[in-house]
Image: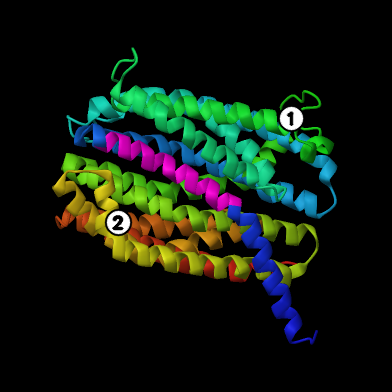
Amino acid sequence: MSSSASPRARFGREVRTTAVLAGPLVVGHVATGLIGFVDSMIAGRHGTATLAAVSIGTAMFWLPIMIPMGTLMALPPSVSQLDGGGRRHEIGALFRQSLWLAAALGLLLFAFMTFSVHALAPLGIAEGIRPGAAAFLHGIRWGVPALTLYYCMRYLSDGLHWTLPTMVFGFGGLLLLVPLGILLTFGGFGVPELGAGGIGAASAIMMWTQTIAFALYLRRARRFADLGLFARFDPPRWASIRELLRVGLPIGVTVAMEGGLFIVTALLIGRLGEVPAAAHQIAVNVAALCFMVPFGLAEATTVRVGHAIGGGHGADGVRRAAFAGLLLVLASQSITGVALLTGNELLAGLYTGDAAVATLAASLLLLAAAFQFPDGVQVLSAGALRGLKDTRVPMVLAALAYWGVGMALGAGLGLGLGWGPRGMWIGLIAGLTVAALLLGLRFLRSSRRVA
């Protein structure tokens, strides 16, 4: 093979490796996105008020949960660097410390969500939406400790290049949620009709089921036997937990700021009434489902970049891993952008029979098509930076893009100038575009410093 062809061949192998690694992650994330789709479908069929309540409740659930979810993202690059550097024997101890961190974060979030229902009125959420949103939050909060533990176990497996469990347990949870959600929402077989609260309770049961199943798998699978994940009891060790927090907390804040851009948008739109809130829930749910593909690719890129560093592949290896992910992201976003442009009315109609809600949701999906490319580029760049364990400066850049640009512009157009949900979504487009530019440039600079 000639020298000119060799770099292309290495890049081609990296693209294939990333695609194989990301495939189950993407499918697993799509399963997670379909959980939101199922929740919204069930709520929409139960009534517009229930759909609006689930929209607000979901927003108030995911905004705080993103911080521990992002903080635990310190685990994949840490595990992949240990694995790539021939220090696999150190992974078990790190995992046990991450479980302590996950449990603590889960309990803090449970307490926070217990009291968050009291914020509905001060936030200005329409009075008719509040009871259903409170019932949803009261139900789903019981699953929060399970969810943080689940992410901890999932990130361990992902960091070791074994992403199939993410797909299997993701779809397993979905298969449980569908019948359970319908039963608890509409009632039947002696079970009372719980409405939005039933959707929250069904989600919590699903989370615990996934977590217990994943723990049993890690304990029994031969693939993880040499790690001794549950071989002994380790008390909390502050040095290990502090290192996870050092790398992970800025990731958690960054993820929360990005997700918070969408979630606070939902809360602000909730001030406008049931129809705008329900339409936004439909559009953001479809957009979130599309986001699962680049998000999975970004997680795979984090692992590949971390593995390149651990293996001593230098700046060329790190950039090759990142650009392979970028190529795949651009391809995926081209497909979803076309799908949103051509199928916006069909997708909106799947959620609701309310003509006003469907029309507004379809128009928002056209705006969602516009941010597919910047959204994909910014999440891929953030994933590559996580692989480098470069998290603090990206946190500041994300704050500037998401909130200094995106939220300021969206609130100004949507509420200040009276453009409503469409104005808020224009702000989303602007924020994601600036984030894509800033984070992309940051990766190009940081990757030059790799030895």
Query: In terms of image quadrants, where is residue 69?
Result: top right
**Label number found at residue 219:** 1
Q: Nearer the viewer, residue 12 or 418?
A: 12
Range shown magenta: 24-44
Q: Is residue 366 above or below residue 198?
A: below
Type of the residue with mark 1: Arg
**Label number found at residue 408:** 2
- Cα separation between marks 2 and 1: 48 Å
Which secondary structure class fits the magenta region best? helix
Type of the residue with mark 2: Ala
Packing grade of label 2 (10 A; few <14, some 14-19, many >=20) is some
- Residue 176 in the image, given as x and y percentages of width and height: 48, 30
Relative to residue 104, is residue 430 drawn left or right?
Answer: left
Can residue 409 be seen here? The reply is no
Q: Is residue 40 magenta?
A: yes
- Residue 234 in the image, given as x and y percentages of width and height: 77, 25
**Label number found at residue 348:** none
Q: Is residue 34 magenta?
A: yes
| Picture residue at 74% right of the left edge, 87% below the top | 4
Point out the image quarter for the N terminus.
Answer: bottom right
| Picture residue at 39% right of the left edge, 56% below the top | 402
| Picture residue at 40% right of the left edge, 66% below the top | 433
